Image (cartoon, grey):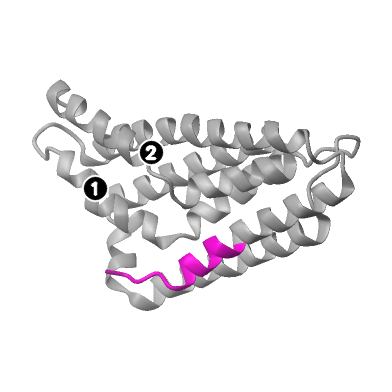
């Protein structure tokens, strides 16, 4: 369905995209610092699922609505800003999770990663700009081509973002036994989420 030559061209481009530090990587890093390796992996999985949702919407043509309607773009964007600020406040208030405390359920980190990705309208606009370069309308159903290429991006992103989160989680486990260090990690994590919120708030459609 997808020309192997096209796929071989797409793979390094997708890898370069996944390796570029961005909001998803920073979010998984923050989750790892705050709640440990399991939360980082779950957050990465949620982000990857969100990416697939964006790819599906783009393949169905719904992503064009976000590009064409400024108010819809802004509504999604500000929901994302408020959600990130809520996560930042929680991280600052509670600090990092102590080793002897009940771990944050992985499903919560998965949900957070999914929602943070879904409320970033820039993702679907990027999908609309990037993936169609590798789509051949004569090669088969366009939606299926979107899904295959999107799955490549989502899988690569999951591995890389989870790896970053795992490193952050491993480092945090050596520090959170100290109450003061745990509070500092909470502030660092909150600062990361606030930075992401500001970045999303000043985002432009172009």
Q: Nearer the viewer, residue 82 or 69?
A: 82
Give, as a single range, the part of the protein colored magenta.
194-206
SS state under label 1 = helix
Query: Measured from the top left, where is residue 199 in percent x and y?
Result: 47, 66
Crowd class of label 2 (few under 14; some 14 to 19; many from 20; radius 10 Å):
many
Which residue does the image show at 39% across and 37% down from the upper left?
A: 19
Seen as rendered, the residue at the extreme left is 138
Q: Are marks 2 and 1 in contact (CB under 8 Å)?
A: no
What SS does tag 2 mark? helix
Task: Work out which residue is located at the far right of the displayed protein and give it.
Answer: 100
Q: Is residue 75 visible?
A: yes
Residue 31 has which mark?
A: none
Query: Relative to 165, is 9 on the left or the right?
Result: left
Q: Nearer the viewer, residue 10 or 22?
A: 22
Residue drawn at x 41%, y 31% is 156
Which residue in the protein does label 1 denote?
A: 130
| Residue matched to label 2 | 18
Q: Relative to 69, does residue 193 appear above or below in the rendering?
A: above
Q: Hey, which quadrant is residue 177 in on the image?
A: top right
85 w.r.t. 109: above or below:
below
Give the image location of residue 170, x and y in percent. Answer: 69, 31
Name the one closer to the observer, 40 or 63.
40
**x and y percentages locating residue 95 in the rendered image:** 80, 53
Residue at point 48% right, 29% down?
159
Q: Is residue 199 magenta?
A: yes
Quarter where residue 87 is shown: bottom right
């Amino acid at each position: 369905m997808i020309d192997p030559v096209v796929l071989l061209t797409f793979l390094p481009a997708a890898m370069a995209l996944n390796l570029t530090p961005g909001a998803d990587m920073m979010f998984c890093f923050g989750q790892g610092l705050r709640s440990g390796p399991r939360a980082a992996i779950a957050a990465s999985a949620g982000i990857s699922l969100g990416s697939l949702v964006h790819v599906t919407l783009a393949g169905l043509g719904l992503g064009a609505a976000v590009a064409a309607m400024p108010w819809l773009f802004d509504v999604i964007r500000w929901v994302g800003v408020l959600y990130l600020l809520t996560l930042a406040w929680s991280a600052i208030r509670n600090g990092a999770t102590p080793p002897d405390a009940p771990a944050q359920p992985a499903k919560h980190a998965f949900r957070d990663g999914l929602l943070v990705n879904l409320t970033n309208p820039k993702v679907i606009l990027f999908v609309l700009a990037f993936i169609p370069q590798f789509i051949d309308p004569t090669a088969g159903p366009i939606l299926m081509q979107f899904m295959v290429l999107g799955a490549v991006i989502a899988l690569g992103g999951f591995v890389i973002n989870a790896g970053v989160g795992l490193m952050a989680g491993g480092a945090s486990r050596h520090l959170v036994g100290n109450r003061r260090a745990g509070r500092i990690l909470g502030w660092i994590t909150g600062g990361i989420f606030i930075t992401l919120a500001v970045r999303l708030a000043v985002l432009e459609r172009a």
